[in-house]
Image (cartoon, rainbow, N blue to C red):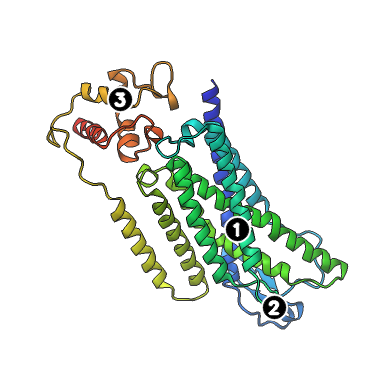
Amino acid sequence: MESYLLDWANVLLRWLHVIVAIAWIGASFYFVWLDNHLLRPEAADLKAKGVDGELWAVHGGGFYNPQKYKVAPANLPQHLHWFYWESYWTWMSGFALFTVLYLFNAESFLIDRRVHDWSAPAAVAAALGFLAAGWLVYDQICRRFGRKADGSIGNDGVVLGLIALFIVAASWAACQLFAGRAAFLIVGAMIATMMSANVFFWIIPGQKQVIADMRAGRPVDPVHGQRGKQRSVHNTYFTLPVLIAMLSNHYGMLHGHAHNWLVLVGLMAVGALVRSWFVQRHQGVNAWPLLVGVALLLVALIAALAPRPAVSTGAEAGAPVSLAQVQAVVAQRCQLCHNAQLAQKGVQLHSAALIEQHAQAIYQQAVLLKTMPLNNATGITDEERALLARWYLQRR
């Protein structure tokens, strides 16, 4: 019953996380797009009101005219819509899901003793440490290197370069400490924590301070707007690397590679280049070299991860595989978690009939995705995976 309830918690939290993440990312992408498409107003009344950019759009049968003020309207409305709960709920639901799936099952999900042999409490503490350290290091980089000589916010080239180096180092460290699948997720969660913390500690408080100063008739410090813009720009470039880090942990060929940290860095670089291309395209810049870089990186990754010819097991590649051979592999590699007493994900594999019943799932998880056995805890070999593949394909 406990396992069943945890599965439901996993499903519902994942559903919530995806919903609120779509809301956050959608709002972020929309406002970046909007900023890059606003046109200087021509109407005298708009200029008199302080409107610095406007856009006419049509969607769903309605006409829309968003306007952006150079500073703010002369009379600030009492009711303003704030875009922050999307960010907070994305982080909270993601952390809850991470807790239910990974922290409560650290022995199975966080630890791969072939990578690093340590206790579950130590692995949990280290995983949480990655999230906290990621924000602290990132924030210090922005504070110490993100100011120009005149005190204004800037030097983004230096800041982004240092952030990239830090993320590469964190990716390497995570892949030396955790199971590959967990390492990818932890790096993605670390960057997502940086994004949400930007909203919580800097963007929203800065905006609220500006509004409070304006309503009180105090001078507005431009640093709040500059810093908010800086952190918002960082967030938009982080978005696709986070998504690819989160999604790629479902594919064993990625996180199971001997140099998985390089695979992760390459995938995140692809995401950052794609987002850069979109931003520059919105600005009217012909950024095709970025797409060339994306294509080259993807080709390099695909080539590097291409499966090598399997070592011969003494039988011809096309030789028939008996169910008894498959049953021997499954008994040794799979039945630890899929037996009459313990049926992980509702799957039992302790009989020939059950193996036949779940043949497609075995092929998908053990051969195509290589996600099972989890973290390869039972040490299944490439030759055994090839045997399972031949058996399944011969059945069709």
Local secondary structure at mark 1: helix
Tell me the crowding category of disc 2: few under 14, some 14 to 19, or many 20 or more residues within 10 angstroms, Cα based.
few
Find disc 2 in the rendering and name its residue: 150
Q: Please give the name of the residue rendered at 33% of the width and 18% of the height, measured from the top-left corner.
A: 350
Q: Separation of disc 1 and disc 3 at Cα? A: 46 Å
The C terminus - image quarter: top left
The reply, left or right, for residue 327 in relation to residue 126 is left
| Relative side of 392 to 18, left or right | left
Quarter of the rendering containing residue 216: bottom right
Report how far apart the C-alphas of labels 3 and 2 lie in the structure. Answer: 67 Å
Q: Is residue 75 left or right of residue 162?
A: right
Question: Circle 2 — which element?
Answer: loop
Chain-order first, disc 1 or disc 3: 1
On the image, the x and y values in percent for residue 25 come to 56, 55
Which is in the foreground here, disc 1 or disc 3?
Answer: 1
Q: Which residue is mark 3?
A: 330
Q: In terms of depth relative to the viewer, which is nearer, 69 or 248? A: 248
Specify the amino acid type for callout 3: Val
Give left or right: position of 317 versus 216: left
Residue 92 versus residue 145 in the image, above or below: above
